[in-house]
Image (cartoon, rainbow, N blue to C red):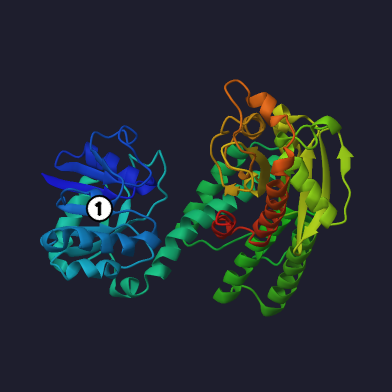
Amino acid sequence: MKTIGIIGFGKVGQYLAHRINTASDLQLMWVCSAHLSTGESNFATTIYNNVKEIAELPDITIISTLDKDIIPTAALLVEKFTHNLANHLFLHTSGSNGSGILFELTKYGASIAAAHPFQTISTNSTDLQIPFAVECDKADALKLKELIFQLGGSSHFLSHKAKQNKPLYHAVSVAASNYVRAAIELSKQLADEVGIDHKAFLQPILQQTVRNAFDDKEITGPIARNDVATIQKHILSLSDHPTLLNSYAHFAIGLLELLHHKGSIAQVDYDTLHSMLTHAHTNSKKNSVEKIILGLGNYGGKYMYTRHNIGFVVTSNILLRCDSQWITEDGIADYAEVNIAGHKIVLARPLTYMNNSGKAAKWLLDKYKLFTDNLLVIVDEYNFPIGKVHLKTSGSDGKHNGVASVIKELGTTKFHRLRCGIDKNFGPNQLVEYVLSPFSPEEQASLYLMLNKAVEAVECYVKNGRNIGLSMSIINSMP
């Protein structure tokens, strides 16, 4: 029986652990993950939180960490097990890196390999026969093939050309999964907008599209036949939905470029369509709101400068900097469309009171046709001292009624939060009274600095756009 250890316990690590536990000739010796504690893995095995804690090496160690952590992980393994690496196999599951990224381990007699699951891994992937793209020495080929078979997968050994350009190989899987999924998401959004059942309409056409693609049938549709009039109708129908128009134009331009590269479309037709689609894309970006910044609080003068109203104060300060004014609509929210560093943003504050903040969040997202990851909620946080601001991408409500309402109304925890410290100077059963109280004179200096910091954090968040990791790095390290 071969023993296995897994370092990294994301979706791939969890999938592998499940398959190892169902294999008769494999034993999961341990799992190593910084974010896992005993009892959380659903597997009867030893849990380590870092490589330095690992007591013994198994026959095979699988590194399924983020790509950026593979080399540091290999270095820690060398440091910990310098003279015990011989005759052990180490493999990583990255698609864009070759096995050579683990080269340091070979200096001490270890074998190395890469085995990338060519599939989108999710909670329902456990019964799939997943193809693995394998890169290893010939001496380990049989061992890898047997392991992957026991994991319920199939082995496909990469050609020399593929091994020489692993990022391009990885782009194949990304295009086939993530980008196809993006096209499906756009189709679902369009179906919802026009009021048709996307499950009934989309599944059959998608299945036929896949069959056509693998039967090498010609691409059809308005782009392929240079149907300018139809494309213009599509663009016009989406003129009030800039986010959807932007995505539509992106995909249309992408298809146009591929057809042009294949020589399937005449140059004059390409030029006409490209100009029209580029214009539509540019206009959609120019007029589209990119993000909603929602400051939580209670409406009314008596609440305005209480601890619970930090979100109101921050958004009001940004509004003043932008020389704009609130618009009140439907009694749900005050809002204003402003420009921050060249980006069109909506500032808002609910009129629904704190415990119904989610109604305002949903109304705004629906109004501007935005997804929840375009929403930043600014809230007070009593677990932080006054002066601290912290950006968080998702998570529980943290016992904050406003955040709980947003989660309930949106049906997801996946929206961004900027948490501003209000300190924790209250006793048992005094939380409500505390958050509804004003800041003391002694706290004003720290409050002033934090408000400026929060405004800077929002500007940073907006400027960095989709690069939320960079925004977190900058904001969460603010002194």
Looking at the picture, tell me which residue is in the foreground, 298 or 233: 298
Looking at the picture, tell me which residue is in the foreground, 109 or 436: 436
- Few, some or many residues within 10 Å of mark 1 (<14, 14–19, 20+): few
Residue at point 59% right, 53% down? 183
| Quarter location, residue 442 | top right
184 shown above or below 300: below
Q: In x, y percent, where is residue 319?
A: 82, 51
Quadrant containing the N terminus in the rendered view = top left
SS for tag 1? helix
Residue at point 64% right, 29% down? 401
Q: In x, y percent, where is residue 241?
A: 76, 51
Which residue is at the far front?
A: 442
Looking at the picture, tell me which residue is in the foreground, 226 or 434: 434
Which residue is at the far bottom?
A: 267
Q: Can residue 284 be seen in this view?
A: yes
Which residue is at the far top?
A: 429
152 shown above or below 262: above
469 shown above or below 152: below
Three-letter amino acid code at the position of disc 1: Lys
| Quarter location, residue 354 | top right
Quadrant containing the C terminus in the rendered view = bottom right
Q: In x, y percent, where is residue 41?
A: 32, 36
Residue at point 87% right, 56% down? 323
112 shown above or below 118: below
Looking at the picture, tell me which residue is in the foreground, 217 or 474: 474
Residue at point 87% right, 37% down? 329
Q: Is residue 237 visible?
A: no
The answer to whether 176 appears left or right of 404 in the picture is left
Residue tagged 1: 52
Q: In x, y percent, where is residue 382?
A: 60, 36
